Amino acid sequence: MSQLETQLHVVVGAGPVGRATATELAAAGHEVVLVSRSGSGPEVAGVRREAADAADADRLTELATGATALYNCVNPPDYTVWPTFWPPVAEAFLVAAERTGALLATASCLYAYGPVDVPMTEDLPDVAPGAKARLRAGMWAEARARHDAGRIRAVEVRGSDYMGPGVSVDAGHIARVAPAALAGRTVRVIGRPDVPHSFTDVRDMARALVAVAAAPQTWGRVWHAPTNAPVTQAEAIADVCRAAGREPVQVKAYPRGTLALSGLVVPVMREMWETAYQFQRPYVLDSSAIERELGLAPTPWDEVCRATAVNADPEAAVLV
């Protein structure tokens, strides 16, 4: 019997990754609690919803008491709140994990690696200079330190830009432009539309989180979610269009300087400068470790694109 075959699993964060993780766990027959600030939202079969402030360690402890795993799938509203949002939330998860003995499984991103000229593997150092990258790197460093000290059990899964079901226009670069593309309009993307970029399906993030949580030999380190071979932004948008039975549209980059100018008046655009390099050079995630060691494989690319198309335009469902 694996570690994950006990009764309770608490998923905090009801965005696309949290919902996919709760769905994956419930489908496997587990008791699952999906936590969000309001406790409301679309029904997820076999999942109980609860309300909580993710920065409230006492409430997280209450919910995670008796749980095998506590999943941090929280997604802050936008970049501008990260400096004040993440520190108390990260500490609350650490405290709850230590008090309850539940494994802390965290869904994270690739920011900590910073600009690199090679495919990103889990053995790269977390040395990115940006503030958001340092924040996420520090969260994992503290969790790993407490894991190594025997105070908690922890594991982290990192993925690239999200595609797939439930990814909103403010949660994914392809999702942001997919509605316009499916309507036949020319779209503009951040950075270059012609350099390779990795995109991770949220369902693959969920499967990775559930898999590592069930495998004690994987704890205490970072894993990359299974992810398809990189494509350019232009190719991804064209494939989403084709998946909906529609013709690809023209994909252009924003004019040089547009982000800088918009950042003068729109704070969230200013925050995007730190990660703009991700779309100006190849940005490739290597997920061979989890594929090799846990037997996971990414959702077929055609299905990723179909789900992304249907998410952007429900009418596309009749065409696929």
Image (spheres, grey):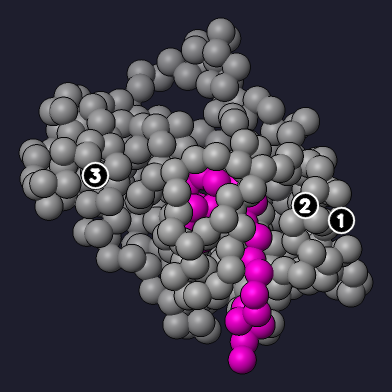
Q: Quadrant of residue 263?
A: top right
Picture layout, residue 32 above or below residue 265: below
Tell me which residue sits at (49%, 40%) in the image: 41
First reached walking from the N terminus: tag 2 or tag 3: 2
In magenta, the rendered stretch is: 1-21
Closest to the camera, between mark 2 and mark 1, is 2
Residue topped by disc 2: 60
| CB contact under 8 Å: marks 2 and 1 | yes
Categorize mark 3 by other alpha carbons within 10 Å: few (<14), some (14-19), many (20+).
Answer: many
Looking at this view, is 280 or 68 the one in front? 68
Secondary element under disc 3, as helix, strand or loop, is helix
Residue topped by disc 1: 95
Residue 3 % position (x, y): 66, 82
Q: Quadrant of residue 237?
A: top left
Rounded to the nearest angstrom, the CA distance separating label 2 from label 3 is 34 Å
Categorize mark 1 by other alpha carbons within 10 Å: few (<14), some (14-19), many (20+).
Answer: some
Going by the numbered disc 3, the residue's amino acid type is Val
Residue 47 % position (x, y): 52, 59
Q: Is residue 82 left or right of residue 236?
A: right
Tell me which residue sits at (33%, 65%) in the image: 299
First reached walking from the N terminus: tag 2 or tag 1: 2
Rounded to the nearest angstrom, the CA distance separating label 1 from label 3 is 39 Å
- Placement of the N terminus among the 4 image quadrants: bottom right
Secondary element under disc 1, as helix, strand or loop, is helix
Q: Is residue 20 magenta?
A: yes
Picture layout, residue 184 above or below residue 245: above
Categorize mark 2 by other alpha carbons within 10 Å: few (<14), some (14-19), many (20+).
Answer: many
Residue 57 % position (x, y): 84, 48
Residue topped by disc 3: 310
Going by the numbered disc 2, the residue's amino acid type is Leu
| CB contact under 8 Å: marks 1 and 3 | no
